[in-house]
């Protein structure tokens, strides 16, 4: 076992982990932040996307020890200070960008990373960026709509459902 | 995944020393290795992380060569190679998905030499030099077949040096489930000749399509490769595409790459 320390959603976090402990397991099992979902566990689906030092990564494919000293943000840190949903989360709700919600934490974290680099992405750019986020029930159109809305753009032009 | 110890050296020499431990293996972005460990296809006792070695990160020009540190992520190459070698930046920009690009590295990709990986085509197609902790290996001598390279045990890729062509294009026919190429062609046009590297097709991994290179040296245009074909013998055939289909794609991808820079 080894000691690991990082900042998670702005707060200091530490714990004893094994070499093989994944960042996703440390967040979920040690810190109780179960919003980071594990879908495929093989780096395909994106349900586990969190930000490490501002970059979107798959927490199922990174060791907790590799996040030593890093700034980590998870879905639990996305809401506004007063607890209300942030712009992206609210847009997912308004546009039915989720059904079961399993993929949603990863979708929201990937969207946050996209909009940081590209505040007004086109529909094609959104679809391309979400290559690594798989949704098994919503069907993507409403997710794309939500992201257009969250970036202050017209949602009328999105391809038919 | 069986348990292992993790070492996080901050210099190449400490990494090499750590790799001298019993059953030690390098870990770079982990985008290939961690799923492999989960599948129990490898069971090292020690993982030596290369991501804390600053000397192995970054993109810079040295004379007329573009030098990329072995632990540089695909996302960094996508951003920082654009000004120097746009054809290579565009290859990096299309590897996997954004989260994979934020972790996966050029050294990991070249060490792994997956028969469908993108960087082997970029390195062989550019005539790059693979720099390790103790020597320099020309790309032509480096790729030894599917998942096989000239690397010795405990040797690490510290840097890759790319000659910069006048123009280059990577054409990737994507296999959407894996996000790897089904077949892809990297065509680079230098003042002294053309190089064509093909990935995703052969059971021996990346290869140079010399017949196309000769034709393109005479006349650089998609027409020059139109009549050429590669044999389906030795091509990968699986549920995503037969060997005949892959052999056909080799020609199509090469023509598209040439057409976009001719
Ligand atoms: C969903 C998904 C999609 C992908 N799509 C593509 C794609 O389209 N094209 C593509 O090319 N790749 C793709 N990849 C693979 C990705 O690019 C990997 O990052 C890459 O193949 C391995 O790099 P890594 O840094 O993650 O290496 P790791 O997984 O850390 O290591 C891979 C192997 O190389 C060894 N190694 C690592 N670094 C070094 C070094 N510097 N010197 C010597 N040995 C070393 C390790 O011991 C291990 O055996 C994809 C991966 C995923 C998960
Ligand atoms: S659980 Fe990490 S990518 Fe699917
Ligand atoms: S909402 Fe169910 S998987 Fe996306």
Image: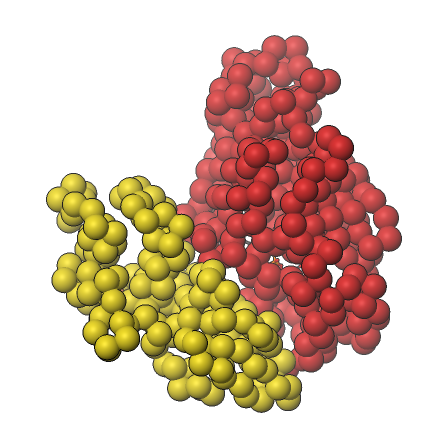
Chain colours: A yellow, B red
Q: Is residue A9 above or below residue B89?
A: below
Please state the horizontal and vertical placement of residue B190, each as a whole percent of the image.
67, 22
Residue situated in front as seen by the camera: A47 or A118: A118
Outermost residue to the top: B219
Please state the horizontal and vertical placement of residue B82, each as a whole percent of the image.
55, 37
Q: Is residue B190 above or below residue B86?
A: above
Residue situated in front as seen by the camera: B132 or A151: A151
Q: Residue at x 61, y 47 (%)?
A: B115
Q: In screen coordinates, is B258 left or right of B2? A: left
Q: Is residue A60 above or below residue A140?
A: below
Q: Is residue B79 above or below residue A54?
A: above
Q: In screen coordinates, is A38 left or right of B180? A: left
Q: Residue at x 59, y 72 (%)?
A: A66
Q: Is any atom of residue A38 visible in this view?
A: no
Please state the horizontal and vertical placement of residue A83, each as a whole percent of the image.
24, 77
Q: Residue at x 41, y 75 (%)?
A: A9
Q: Is any atom of residue B256 visible in this view?
A: yes
Residue situated in front as seen by the camera: A100 or B242: A100
Q: Quadrant of the N terminus of chain A?
A: bottom right
Outermost residue to the right: B134
Q: In screen coordinates, is A141 left or right of B133? A: left
């Amino acid at each position: 076992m080894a000691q690991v320390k990082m900042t998670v959603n702005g707060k200091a976090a530490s714990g004893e982990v094994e070499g093989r402990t994944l960042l996703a397991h440390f967040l979920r099992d040690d810190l109780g932040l179960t919003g980071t979902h594990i879908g495929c566990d093989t780096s395909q689906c994106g349900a586990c996307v969190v930000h490490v030092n501002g970059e979107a990564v798959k927490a199922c494919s990174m060791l907790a020890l590799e996040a030593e000293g890093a700034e980590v943000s998870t879905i639990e840190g996305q809401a506004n200070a007063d607890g209300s949903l942030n712009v992206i989360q609210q847009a997912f709700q308004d546009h039915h960008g989720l059904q079961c919600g399993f993929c949603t934490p990863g979708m929201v974290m990937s969207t946050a990373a996209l909009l940081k680099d590209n505040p007004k992405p086109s529909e094609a750019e959104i679809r391309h960026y979400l290559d690594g986020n798989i949704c098994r029930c919503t069907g993507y159109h409403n997710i794309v709509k939500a992201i257009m809305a969250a970036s202050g753009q017209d949602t009328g032009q999105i391809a038919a459902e | 995944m069986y348990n292992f110890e993790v070492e996080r050296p901050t210099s190449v020499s400490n990494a090499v020393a750590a790799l001298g431990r019993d059953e030690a293996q390098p870990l770079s972005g982990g985008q290939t290795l961690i799923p492999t460990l989960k599948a129990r296809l490898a069971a090292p006792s020690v993982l030596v992380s290369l991501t804390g070695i600053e000397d192995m990160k970054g993109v810079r020009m040295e004379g007329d060569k573009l030098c990329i540190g072995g632990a540089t992520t695909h996302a960094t190459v996508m951003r920082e190679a654009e000004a120097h070698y746009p054809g290579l930046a565009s290859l990096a920009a299309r590897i996997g998905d954004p989260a994979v690009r934020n972790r996966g590295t050029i050294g990991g990709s070249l060490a792994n030499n997956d028969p469908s990986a993108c960087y082997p085509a970029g390195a062989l197609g550019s005539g790059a030099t693979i720099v390790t902790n103790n020597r320099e290996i020309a790309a032509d001598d480096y790729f030894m077949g599917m998942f096989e390279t000239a690397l010795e045990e405990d040797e690490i890729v510290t840097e890759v040096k790319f000659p910069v062509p006048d123009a280059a294009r990577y054409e990737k026919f994507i296999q959407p489930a894996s996000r790897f190429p089904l077949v892809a062609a990297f065509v680079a046009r230098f003042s002294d000749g053309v190089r064509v590297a093909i990935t995703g097709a052969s059971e021996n991994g990346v290869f140079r399509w010399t017949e196309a290179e000769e034709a393109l040296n005479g006349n650089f245009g998609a027409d020059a490769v139109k009549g050429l074909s590669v044999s389906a013998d030795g091509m990968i055939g699986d549920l995503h595409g037969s060997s005949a289909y892959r052999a056909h794609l080799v020609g199509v991808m090469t023509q598209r790459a040439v057409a976009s820079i001719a």
